[in-house]
Amino acid sequence: MASAAVTYTGQASPPENKLVLWYRQAATNWMTSALPIGNGQLGAMVFGGPDQEHLQFNEKTVWSGNKTTYGAYQNFGDLYLDFNGVTTVNNYRRELDIEDAVAKVSYSIGTVEYTREYFSSYVDNVLVARLTANNPAMQNFTVAVNDAHTGTKTASGKTITISGNLQLLSYEAQVMVLNEGGTVTATGDKITVSNADAVTILLAGGTDYDASSATCKGSGLHERISKQITDAAAKPYSELKKNHITDYKSLFERVTLNLNDSKPTIPTRDLIVKYNNGTRDPALDVLYFQYGRYLTIASSRGVGLPSNLQGIWNDSNTPPWACDYHSDINVQMNYWPVDVTNLSECFQPLADYIYNQAIVQDTWKKLATSMGSKGFTLKTENNIFGHTQWELNSEANAWYCMNLWDHFTFTKDTSFVATTAYPVMKSACEFWVSTLVADTDGKLVAPDSWSPEHGNPWREKGSTYAQTLIWDLFTNTIEASRILNVDQEFRTTLQTKLDQLDPGLRVGNYGQLREWKYQNDIKNEQHRHISHLICLYPGEQVSPFINTTFSDAAKVSLVDRGDGGTGWARAWKICTWARLLDGNHAKTLLQNALNLTTVTTTDMNNGGGVYENLLDAHPPFQIDGNFGGTAGIAEMLLQSHLGEITFIPALPSSWPDGSIKGLCARGGFEIDFEWSGSKFVAASILSRKGSRCVIRGTDYYVYDDNMKAVPCSTSATHTTFQTKPNSRYKISISPTAVHTTEKIYKKELYNNCTSFFTTTSINTLPIGPSGKEKLVSIFDLHGRLLKRIRTDKGFINIKKESGIAKAALYVKVTSHKSQVTSHK
């Protein structure tokens, strides 16, 4: 922990980039203020102390326990850099730039400016720290590594090594100190750096965990870690950083969100405080949305294990709930934003984990066998070895399959269905085909079902949670069988069972969607779980577009459960209110999710919010709320779960103008779109698979990439057109045309906007009356925003403003007046 004796003077300016968490003091608490970095598997929390840097580090496979002993996710260790004699620093700034996934600390002492950079590289599989100054020979510090267990520690040459054994797994980490100038000396179990110009520190670590092995234990740990750090050490820092940023940006930059916000000029904690006090800068909404995507990339790549209750970050050997894989909401919620926010590659660790435990390993299958059933099932708490404990959650097999199937609906990857999803889905169906029983009304129900973690008693047959999940499982598995053209006989059996299944949807005595088939719901019981509403989100059985009887009942249930709860509960409610098309209520839940808290002890009721480092507070820290919040914001802007694209279905009044680039819709579509005055303006849709595109609404004009009109069929509620693979389509609310001569040929007037096509050959482009403020947006013909400017001039130089020498462009001019003069 950074020393409280350090004095901070001056006031550091804001960072250059916009999407940055930043502070003017070092972190003093791991949970609330340290900043997370990670490569999907290897991560650290950065404290940024001027006198003592502290990097607490983790690796996703460092678990105690085994197949018969539960154990827990473990703290790996701590890396300390001690800077003697630092008592006062000027213009201190600690930051996490999520635009390039680099954490940074900067400050000055006298005339010397010090900079530290930190990142965890997926490409080179090492954690990297870099220390520099604007003067030579200024790097003087001691490097120490703390092993969180009772292993061995050695320092030799430029490397410190820790290694040891847990109940089953062995672990090892190596830290290498690479100096430029000066000297590096190993003394005891520490390394001292003296008078160096710059220093790069590399950390590689892991265990001998092997998910494919029957024992979950592999070999070659020392050789693997040594190779990782040796290979990284052979590259200059500039190459390591370039590799990392290029790789990260290839994922992160796919999606950009603009809510007509600007770069914050105050530290992140102050931004949250002002937001809580009513000055709700949409920049915080954007930052929180993108932070969830950052955390996904940082915690869900590499080894076939999903992000756990805390992602990959944990400083305790006895963490809350073992920092495990809870199957009754938490693991599933971690993956809600992955596909819709264009990070499908990050889904693979979850898919690998589910397939491995359900099909390859035997623990989940043995549990089903012990119940007299086929297939597989599991309990609520799960470790990485397949051990499953506490409260049977048989329905989780169907919930995991919901995640798998939803991933397919986004990617349309039939090979994924054939090799991964369908085998798991079929096995889960086999469990329920052999488990369902006929109720007194003749309908098939799940015996002894529950509704996590609620009810009195907790179990009865035919709970809404169970029935709607089984309905979803059977429905999707039948479709998967059709797509693959396999198992026709089994498909027929499933269809028969589906026809006999109690669908689980009932309206209760006070208008609510019933949680139980038999026991009465308790009104005004504001419990954190809303498991009976899984049919609303992430499921698709209930929607205002399908049957308002049940969607209205779901609304009553949501109102009854309240707008508070744990962090993840608030995130789930953002998503459900978005599905009910109530953007303002969804935004209220987002605001509640962004409630600043410092509570780190367990609160199971109404303590949810975020810490100053924007990590979700259950409390304590639990990362699912971050991911659920990101998914909720995406759901407010775009929905596609019913096989149709709906633009801004739950737009709050506080986001009247904006745009988003790169969101994904089911069917293999990637979409950029914008809105103004709370109304849809235009979209660009990339069809990756050539699926039929269905858009809710009829006031659309559709053009291909050459701006030729695309034939559409329209109904009372939808616009439909056939796409081609890897082709882009433009959606507009007014007819447009492009001509090749260098004039403004076509101009459309709607609301308070003038829009038209032009070319860069027109140097002086008339845009409206001089002296009237206007917002000018310049797009290329793919719908990508090139520039947005405010001006009171009557003309602009389109070539200069666009930065393009020769091209056809689309220009939109928005006036503050209700009408804009059309120029001939």
Image: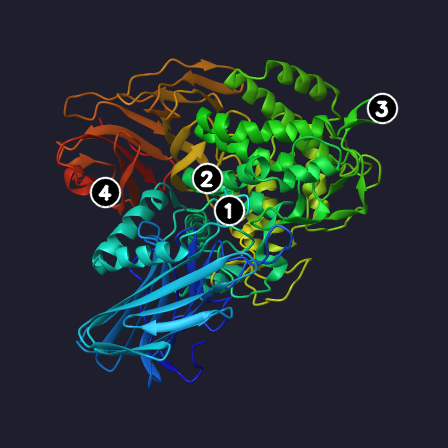
Distance between the Cα atoms at labels 1 and 3?
41 Å
Q: Local crowd at mark 3 within 10 Å, few (<14), some, or many (≥20)?
A: few
Nearer to us in this view, 19 or 445: 445
Task: Give the Cα distance between marks 1 and 4.
Answer: 57 Å
Name the residue beneath numbered marker 2. Answer: 348
Contact? badges 1 and 4 (CB < 8 Å): no
Classify mark 2: residues with Cα within 10 Å, few (<14), some (14-19) or many (20+): some
Rendered residue at 35%/85% (across/down): 87
Residue type at tag 1? Pro
Report which residue position mark 1 lands on. Answer: 306
Q: Where does the image place residue 280, in percent across and percent down from the top left? A: 48, 56
Marks 2/3: CA distance? 42 Å
Mark 2 touches mark 3? (CB < 8 Å): no
* Residue 564, percent from left and from top: 65, 54
Q: Which of marks 4 and 1 precedes in the sequence? A: 1
Look at the numbered discs 4 and 2 and tell me whether their residues touch, using CB distance below 8 Å.
Answer: no
**Of callouts 1 and 3, which one flags the residue occurring earlier in the amino acid sequence?**
1
The mark lying in front, picked from 3 and 4, is: 3
Most foreground residue, 599 or 385: 385
Residue depicted at 55% across the width and 53% down the height: 591
